[in-house]
């Protein structure tokens, strides 16, 4: 698991808005290794989706990206739209955020799934292939399911269908943006199981973007935490939950229902006026003068443990 499949290298993303230019992603560098499940967490507006979309060049026209995204050692941001079309879906697939609008209501599931595998000319028995995928995500009656329409399925079932749509084309990397949004607890677990099975069986790398700390905990090998566009921590899942490396992560964990729902102090940052130094300093109980004045360095403070916080920075 040591070869990076995808590397974000100093990615920044700016949007021009009627209030001026806003920076949604700030100098993020991150490696995703082959076969791993990596989670991105952080509160709404922290730049998770925007970072994910830079890898697919799917940002709107008012966005400007600097830095580099390297995939299988090739630079992605230099590719033309035509070249990008060979990457999207085939090499890197996105499981979209909204199952309701991503499935065509008037087409059978079979028709929509077959579309996802139309490039795989060598596949003789496409329905058999799709049925095996449906079984992999725990559908008990795959043939019956192929004959159904989206309105006959629950939210969790539709989300699992979208997982197959992304994975059936056998991409190297899957990006799932909020795959459990709006689902109840049992459906959430089904979707997590589906994502895990699909990735483990095929060796597909998964980048999963989620608000849901529980989902991140049970699904991911490693987790990155974003705050106001910056990556503030990257850690393996167990140690992130046991000993968070950044005070923001610690505050997120304390706000969980299972931890007594201790609300985080202060307000979410306004991206048009991001606080100086460490952007989390106004809300941080450990903050000192230095945190107001300087950006803490990205520091490796243990094996696979990184944080951008002076608590871990080597003293100078
Ligand atoms: N098209 C756009 N035009 C202007 N600003 C945008 C646009 N898209 C995103 N942004 C800005 O980028 C910021 C980051 O957005 P992003 O969708 O990445 O957040 P997120 O972390 O995925 O949050 P959520 O959990 O709500 O999905 C937003 O706060 C918003 O200010
Ligand atoms: Ni998002």
Image (tube, grey):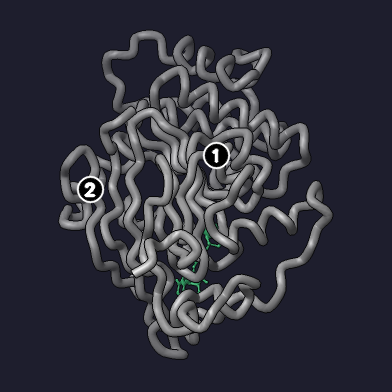
- Identity of the residue drawn at 63% across and 34% down: 218
Image spot of residue 232 (x, y percent): 47, 61
Q: Quadrant of the C terminus?
A: bottom left
Does any portion of residue 255 appear in the rendered image? yes
Identify the secondary structure beneath mark 1.
Answer: helix
Image spot of residue 83 (x, y percent): 18, 47
In the image, taking residue 86 as reference, residue 250 lies left or right, namely right
Relative to residue 307, is residue 122 depicted above or below? Answer: above
Q: Which residue is mark 2?
A: 70
In the image, taking residue 25 as reference, residue 235 lies left or right, namely right
For label 2, the crowd category at 10 Å Cα-Cα, with few meaning under 14, some 14 to 19 and many 20 or more, is some
- Identity of the residue drawn at 64% across and 19% down: 138
Tell me whether circle 1 and circle 2 mark residues in contact (CB < 8 Å): no
Q: Nearer the viewer, mark 1 or mark 2?
A: 1
**Earlier-in-chain disc, 1 versus 2:** 2
Q: Residue furthest right?
A: 260
Question: Number of marks in the image?
Answer: 2
Q: 202 and 39: which one is in front?
A: 39
For label 1, the crowd category at 10 Å Cα-Cα, with few meaning under 14, some 14 to 19 and many 20 or more, is many
Q: Which residue is mark 1?
A: 237
Identify the secondary structure beneath mark 2.
Answer: strand
Q: 284 and 76: which one is in front?
A: 284
Image spot of residue 312 (x, y percent): 46, 59
Q: 301 and 247: which one is in front?
A: 301
Relative to residue 289, is residue 7 depicted above or below? Answer: above
Query: How far apart are the two marked residues, 1 and 2, measured between alpha carbons?
Result: 24 Å
């Amino acid at each position: 698991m040591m070869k990076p499949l995808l590397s974000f290298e100093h990615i920044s993303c700016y949007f021009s808005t009627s209030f001026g230019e806003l920076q949604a992603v700030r100098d993020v560098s991150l490696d995703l290794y082959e076969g791993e499940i990596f989670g991105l967490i952080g509160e709404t507006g922290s730049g998770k989706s925007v970072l994910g979309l830079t890898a697919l060049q799917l940002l709107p026209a008012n966005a400007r990206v600097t830095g580099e995204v390297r995939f299988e050692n090739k630079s992605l941001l230099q590719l033309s739209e035509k070249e990008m079309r060979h990457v999207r879906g085939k090499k890197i697939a996105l499981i979209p955020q909204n199952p309701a609008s991503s499935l065509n209501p008037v087409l059978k599931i079979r028709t929509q799934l077959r579309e996802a595998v139309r490039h795989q000319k060598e596949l003789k028995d496409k329905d058999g292939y799709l049925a095996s995928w449906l079984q992999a995500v725990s559908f008990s009656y795959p043939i019956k399911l192929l004959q159904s329409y989206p309105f006959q399925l629950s939210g969790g079932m539709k989300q699992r269908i979208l997982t197959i749509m992304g994975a059936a084309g056998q991409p190297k990397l899957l990006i799932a943006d909020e795959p459990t949004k709006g689902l109840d607890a049992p459906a959430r677990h089904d979707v997590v199981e589906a994502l895990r099975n699909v990735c483990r069986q095929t060796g597909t790398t998964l980048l999963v973007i989620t608000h849901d700390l529980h989902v991140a905990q049970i699904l991911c090998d490693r987790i990155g935490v974003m705050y106001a566009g910056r990556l503030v921590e990257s850690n393996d899942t167990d140690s992130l939950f046991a000993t968070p490396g950044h005070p923001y992560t610690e505050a997120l964990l304390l706000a969980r229902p299972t931890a007594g729902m201790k609300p985080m102090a202060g307000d979410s940052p306004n991206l048009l006026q991001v606080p100086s130094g460490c952007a989390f300093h106004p809300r941080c109980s450990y903050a000192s003068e230095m945190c107001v004045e300087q950006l803490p360095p990205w520091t490796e403070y243990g094996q696979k443990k990184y944080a951008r916080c002076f608590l871990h920075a080597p003293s100078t």
